[in-house]
Image (cartoon, rainbow, N blue to C red):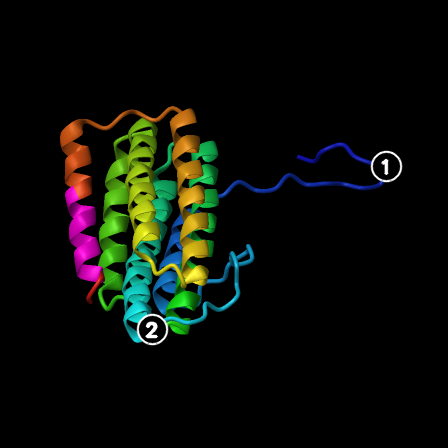
Amino acid sequence: MTLPTAPGLLVYPRPQMTNIDTGLQAIDSALRTLSGVAKARRARPLARESAGLSVAERRLSGALMRVNHVGEVCAQGLYQAQALTARTPALRRQMLAAAQEETDHLAWTEARLRELDARPSLLNPLWYGGAFALGLLAGRAGDGWSLGFVVETERQVEQHLAGHLTRLPEADAASRAIVAQMKADEAAHGLAAQQSGATPLPAPMRWAMRFAAKLMTMTAHRI
């Protein structure tokens, strides 16, 4: 089948991605996420170096940005799994588009950790695997539940990032700019999921997600 166009020119429709294609993309994303070679499409917010950080402030910023980096590792696992299990091409595209913005966050936090002489979490493979499993469960439950999971996840992440903005040293302008942009992007992802027909999650599920996130945050702060 071809599409009509200018005389003498044939344009073939772009093939649709299959589940196998999406699965291979998820494997590629996992390898890139865990190997520390994420590439951002957008320029990093306020890329200038912060000045005047004390040893204690640098250590605090490094710990907080390590936690934020873990959050982005988890986001890759969640969105890739939800794209893999999406029932419609439109939702699959929405999940993959969100994953790309999260890749920007991943690259930004990786770069900032290096600048702060801080390391990523040693448990990143565990975080990614757990998040991917949760994403599969949410996706298998149906698109409405999957979108509801995104809404609640992004709501909690936005609150978490707001808390980090109060804890990051005032002098650390570079880290603060990254976190502020991440917060804005997460809010947009949650709103998009809400407008796409998200099913509200029951309270016990929201509480369990909050408890798991707190446990991850406390662990990643140190390990």
State the residue at coordinates (21%, 48%): 213
Residue 214 on the magenta span: yes
- Which corner quadrant holds the C terminus? bottom left
Q: Which residue is mark 2?
A: 54
Q: Which residue is mark 1?
A: 7
Estimate the spatial distance between the alpha carbons at disc 2 and disc 1, rounded to whole Å.
Answer: 68 Å
In the image, is residue 43 above or below residue 118? above
Q: Amino acid at mark 1?
A: Pro
Whichever of callouts 2 and 1 sits on the residue coming sooner in the sequence is: 1
Neighbours of disc 1 within 10 Å: few (<14), some (14-19), many (20+): few
From the top left corner, tell me how far across and down residue 149 is, in percent.
29, 35
Mark 2 against mark 1, which lies toward the viewer? 2
From the top left corner, tell me how far across and down residue 9 is, in percent.
81, 41
From the top left corner, tell me how far across and down residue 55 is, in percent.
30, 75
How many numbered circles are shown? 2
- Which corner quadrant holds the N terminus? top right
Q: For residue 50, which quarter of the picture?
A: bottom left
Q: State which region is magenta.
A: 211-220
State the residue at coordinates (36%, 52%): 76
